[in-house]
Amino acid sequence: MSAPPLRGLSTLARPRRLPQTLRPIVGCLVLGLLLAFSRALLAQMDEPFPGSSTPPPAGHTTVNSSIFLERILGMDMDHNTYQAAWWVVFTWYDPAASAAVSTATGAALRGGDCGRWCESSGIALTGCCDGLWLPRVHLLNMVALSQEQISRHRIHANASSGIVTWSARLVGTWYSPFDSRAYPFEHQHLLLELGLSDAQAHTASLRWEQVAKLNNTPHTKGADLAGWRMKWGKGKLYDSRACMTHLSTFRYELATDAAADPSAPAAYVETPSALLNYTEGHLAGASTPESCGSYTSVYAEAQALFPAVVLVGDIMLKRIASYYVLANLFPVLLVTLITFTVFFMPITALGDRMMVVLTMFLSLTALQFVFAYPPANYINALGQVVLVSYAMIALACAECLVVNQLATVAHVVTTKRSCEAKYGEVLRGRSSTRRLRTQISQQAPRGGTYRREDSDLTGMPIPEEHVSLDLPAPSASCPVQLPRTASRSGASQARPGPAPAPKSLSSFYAQPSPTPSSSAPASLVEISLDTKLNPAPSSNGLGHLAPPQTLPPNPFRKSSDGTSAVDQASTLHASSIDLKGMAAAIGGPGPDPSRGCCFPGAWAGCSPAADGAAGAADAGPLRRCCCAVGEWFAEAAARVAWFYRQCKEDPEFAHFLAARIDKWSLIFCLLSYTVAVTVVLVLQTMVGDHKLMLSSDRPGNM
């Protein structure tokens, strides 16, 4: 049996309706609140210096401008804006101002209306400024005025001096381009731009008087923001009149016969920009636009959207970098310096070395996620230091690999030779090595070497015609074992030869072309050169004697006068040597003329230039530099190769060389890292945009 429903539940869930008599009253109240709020919002968004339509004082009026920074409320680096409280003060001379204020104030005290009170309090005791001429000033870089600010302004017309002072307190958001290239050692500029309306520019002009921090603020530190410190304030001028020579300003004035005809229309008056009055006074300097841009005739007026002369107040702030040095820069430097401890570790401890390097690399990567970089599309100073640290860690890693390779290469080579001696037959597999070695061992005297054209560890069979042998010297009792000839049976032929001379030189020449019955290509045959230049007859592979080869004279043989060919050649000039003739005499093609002089020791062997010049002697400076650089690299590569061969044969030399590399790598890394970090910080801090602005008149980061 279900429980009965609770009483009053449906009544609570049902919304209560207003009585019919109260609905119109509530609707009127809501509409009134909305209207009041909208009017207050519109009143807050009006420009703080709207000016007045009263005729200006006689002659030209110079309006002195001063701005004072009271508070810095915040900085938005993402949107290039800042929030601050400014005091803006204008002063000018108007001897009739005091009388106009007195007349308007008397009417207000007698119960009349006042359209503009001289003070934000709105009481008649402060005066009524109706009928007073006021300049219309634009705040050009203002983004928005705070809707919650307390309006504070004051107009004072001094009866004794005739000076009119108009001051106002502004709390809002301003645009200012920020530059974070020197982060965390950067300076930033807070700009405030003022411009006089074109309608009043024919009789008035703005002039800087003072830009500073408000010093008489009680109970506070002043304009400094947390993490920032104010350095100075300057007033500058941005003059673009050169780009507006063909433009004019306009205004409306009463017609000359307005007194006779009250219904006469107002007169439209144009004034060329060149005839406008501008006071050249400024506190720091004047700058002009780099380019006027290109506009069509229809949109030519777009150049006059801003006043021709703009006053720019510049407040420079400096970031307090001590926190960022301890929290960001110091850990990066410490991680990099710890990486250099691998140079003190044992040479063969590659695992321990790489563990330190990789640990520091991961630590530096993790630090980057902690850094709060300012948003920008460039790399700031701290980011460049991090990049240099990455480069140093990578260099230390490469050095560890090179040093370990040098220290262990001798052991690797020894192990390889031992394995080849013990297990050579197993590693090589089936090949012609055993058969050829058996044939050579049966000959007497024993001698010669065996060489294969591939790696001994591949285990792949090699065709017999690809095997090269250095055969024993021919003798009367030892037949010459020639390389494989055109015979398809694979059997080699032998013939007896004369005994070798006591001293011989070896050279390789191409074997004569095979006979028509042979199909094998020509091979290389070693020919013995004795000191008497009587070569032994050789075989052509078919059992017949081949004609002796024509050989060049022996350069080491003494002539009848006791001098050798080498001594005689040393007295010859390089230009008198016929390289092509010598090459033809020995049967070779000679040096390649296309190689030029860009290889070691080739200066004397350069072929003459096509235009009859002397070749390398008359080569241009670029070619000589390239040749010198090429020779240096070739010599360096040869020296490195020699050291590496020595390390293969001598383990002690390898350890000594690795220790020296560790020592000099440590010195190089420390010096290069210190220099690189110093250069980066100095360039970004001392040659940044804020420093460039000190020697120029361009406002801030513009």
Image (spheres, rainbow, N blue to C red):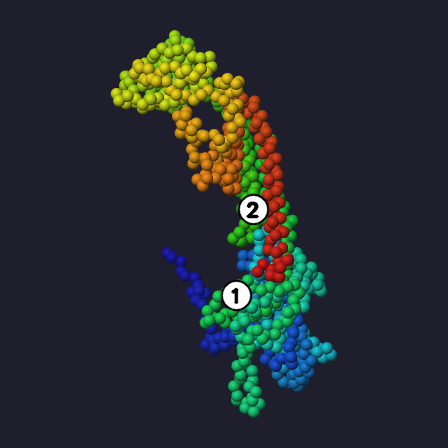
Q: Amino acid at mark 1?
A: Cys
Q: Secondary structure at mark 1?
A: loop
Q: Nearer the viewer, residue 34 or 40?
A: 40
Q: Residue at x 66, y 56 (%)?
A: 229
Q: Residue furthest front?
A: 561
Q: Residue at x 51, y 42 (%)?
A: 620
Question: Which residue is label 2 attached to?
Answer: 384
Mark closest to the chain's N terminus, 1 or 2: 1
Query: Considering the image in quadrants, where does the C terminus appear?
Result: bottom right
Whole-angstrom CA distance, mark 1 to mark 2, is 36 Å
Q: Residues within 10 Å of mark 2 (few under 14, many from 20)?
A: some
Q: Is residue 426 visible?
A: no
Count of numbered badges drawn on the protein: 2
Residue 292, numbered label: 1
Percent from the top left, x then y, of residue 250?
54, 77
Q: Residue furthest top?
A: 477
Left or right of 202, for residue 615: left
Percent from the top left, x then y, of residue 259?
57, 90
The image quarter containing residue 139 is: bottom right
Q: Taking 159 as reference, is 492 above or below it? A: above
Q: Amino acid at mark 2?
A: Gln
Left or right of 205, for residue 33: left
Q: Taking 511 as reference, is 55 above or below it? A: below
Q: Residue at x 27, y 19 (%)?
A: 488
Q: Residues within 10 Å of mark 1 (few under 14, many from 20)?
A: few
Q: Residue at x 61, y 77 (%)?
A: 203
Q: Secondary structure at mark 2?
A: helix
Residue 167, numbered label: none
Query: Considering the image in quadrants, where does the N terminus appear?
Result: bottom left
